[in-house]
Amino acid sequence: NRIFIPEVFFTNNCLTGEDVIKSTRVLGELDGIFGDRQAFDGMDKDQVIYQVSSYLPVLENTPGGLFMGITTLYPGKVGSEFFMTKGHFHSNSDRAEFYWGVEGEGMLILMNEQREVWAERIFPGSLHYIPGKVAHRVANTGYQKLVFSACWPSDAGHDYATISAAGFAQRLIDVNGVPTLV
Ligand code: 6PG
Ligand code: NI
């Protein structure tokens, strides 16, 4: 019998299955990425900002393979800046990625190597093609959790260092209730 049941499931806006890896980022691990140092210092560093469940069916760095992940980003702000992911370029910088919105609302913030920044609204059903050489980060601009999914090449890798060192050239700030790049 050559008919099989899949081992990983995309149900309830979550990945489940034995091979799914879950990781959590608490506020303390995002030290330095938010602009308002004073607001950051006054907050609980153990609070969970986002969780990623990923399915890596092949080894990291395998050429030609694909990875898939679902990120749940909680609502909140540090000062007037929305909770967001760390953000990264890919280590193999020309590797592209798809994101798509699943639940809640937010903004995909993008920056090219010339440090030009732009953003796309994320909402359930939105689909985003992130070309190679474009750094990507997501902010939750709503009042409920934001869930988005991603698919990227298994040899993309993550370059967090460039963003840790120089940040994005613009921040997504709540200006009188309107998410604004400044
Ligand atoms: C990737 C994806 C995505 C991302 C998470 C968390 O390349 O793996 O862009 O899965 O890693 O949304 O964001 P950070 O990796 O920037 O913390
Ligand atoms: Ni990525």
Image (cartoon, rainbow, N blue to C red):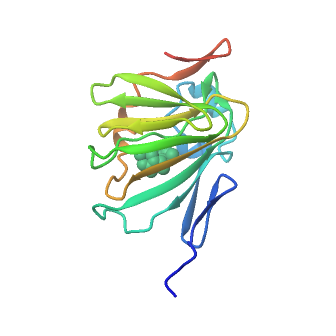
**Which image quarter: residue 144?**
top right
Seen at 43% across and 44% down, the residue is: 98
Query: Which corner quadrant of the image does residue 45 belong to?
Result: top right
Give the tally of numbered discs: 0
In front: 7, or 73?
7
Seen at 30% across and 47% down, the residue is 95
Q: Is residue 177 left or right of residue 136?
A: right
| Left or right: residue 53 compared with residue 89 | right
Q: Position of residue 97 (x, y in %)?
A: 39, 45
Task: Name the residue at the bottom extreme.
Answer: 1
Position in image of residue 11 (x %, y %): 66, 58
Horizontal side of 27 relative to 2 (left or right) equals right
Q: Position of residue 65 (x, y in %)?
A: 35, 62
Where residue 138 appears, as percent x and y from the top left, is 52, 36
Residue occupying image coordinates x 39% and y 38%: 130
Q: Which residue is at the far top?
A: 176
Q: Nearer the viewer, residue 3 or 180?
A: 3
> Residue at point 60% right, 31% down?
106
Q: Nearer the viewer, residue 31 or 171?
A: 171
Give the answer, above or below, for where 1 lies relative to 93: below
